[in-house]
Image (cartoon, rainbow, N blue to C red):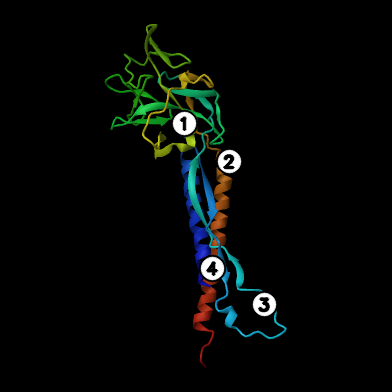
């Protein structure tokens, strides 16, 4: 009886976590460059139930002996992890010179990881470490450095901060920045051949698991892309399917809740009515 409680409660917890990540996807549906997450649900390991002391139980001559094994027992489900999806989002034109979007054209396929590679802007955090994002909603700080909307410095191909005189700069499709027709810097576009190995930090940022910087994309002749000035990459969250999955998670949560209530009622009857002395 109590095992049923645990199984249904595990289902409720799993569906609650599914609801949380789907709600987070919806809340970031309008965040530039946001990569929606998907969940991986798995069952707890099954247990093999066996009869105890079966050899000591007397059997009649006509009884059928099926051995000590009763069968397997499942212990419920849990959410193992959430994984970002690195599909390309739609581009939205803003005509703002500091808005930059990456348009992936050809990405090499990683046969070992069974996934395509992905491109990112390289930025520098407060500790001087490199982080990676697809949010190209940039701005200029008071010193004239190109930064993200949360104040991180955008890096060039030499891992240096990018400094410009004003927002009247021009960016070519390969990421080269021009001022008065003079080359100022070239945007670093970082390439990961297995983006699922990156660790998510929040606010649209990713980092490598070993702390080493990702290589520059132009050094890989197997891929192609364009850098689009005056555009932003929209979130890749599918709002319609997310709402559908959210409703399904709510229904599954309620179904498990009904099971818990049914077990609770049975336990109440067992504790208060069965075997009552009259």
Comes first in the chain, label 4 or label 2? 4
Report the disc number at residue 4. Answer: 4
> Horizontal and vertical percent for residue 54?
59, 78
- The mark closer to the camera, 2 or 3, is 3
Is residue 248 placed above or below 59 in the rendered structure? Answer: above
> CA separation, marks 2 and 1?
18 Å
> Horizontal and vertical percent for residue 89?
53, 30
Label 2 sits on a secondary structure element that is: helix
State left or right for residue 148 relative to residue 240. left
Nearer to me, 120 or 146:
120
Q: Residues within 10 Å of mark 3 (few under 14, many from 20)?
A: few
Q: Which residue is mark 3?
A: 65
> CA separation, marks 2 and 3?
55 Å
> CA separation, marks 1 and 3?
64 Å
Report the disc number at residue 33. Answer: 1
Comes first in the chain, label 1 or label 3? 1
Q: Residue furthest bottom?
A: 278
């Amino acid at each position: 009886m109590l095992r049923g409680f645990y199984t249904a409660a595990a289902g409720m917890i799993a569906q609650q976590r599914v609801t949380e990540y789907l709600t987070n996807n919806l809340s970031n549906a309008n965040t530039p460059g946001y990569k929606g997450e998907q969940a991986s649900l798995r069952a707890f390991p099954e247990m093999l139930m066996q009869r105890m002391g079966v050899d000591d139980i007397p059997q009649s001559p006509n009884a059928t002996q099926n051995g000590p094994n009763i069968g397997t027992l499942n212990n419920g489900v849990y959410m193992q992890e959430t994984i970002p999806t690195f599909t390309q989002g739609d581009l939205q034109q803003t005509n703002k010179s500091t808005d930059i979007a990456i348009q992936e054209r050809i990405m090499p396929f990683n046969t070992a990881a069974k996934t395509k590679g992905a491109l990112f802007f390289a930025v520098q955090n407060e500790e001087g470490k490199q982080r990676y994002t697809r949010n190209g909603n940039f701005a200029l700080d008071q010193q004239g450095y190109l930064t993200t909307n949360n104040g991180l410095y955008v890096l060039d191909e030499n891992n240096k901060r990018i400094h410009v005189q004003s927002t009247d700069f021009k960016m070519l499709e390969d990421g080269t920045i021009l001022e008065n027709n003079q080359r100022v810097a070239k945007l670093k576009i970082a390439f990961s051949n297995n983006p699922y190995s990156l660790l998510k930090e929040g606010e649209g940022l990713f980092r490598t698991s070993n702390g080493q910087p990702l290589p520059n994309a132009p050094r890989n002749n197997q891929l192609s892309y364009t850098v689009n000035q005056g555009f932003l990459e929209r979130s890749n969250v599918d709002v319609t399917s997310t709402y559908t999955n959210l409703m399904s998670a709510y229904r599954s949560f309620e179904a498990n809740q009904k099971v818990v209530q049914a077990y609770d009622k049975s336990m109440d009857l067992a504790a208060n009515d069965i075997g009552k002395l009259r």
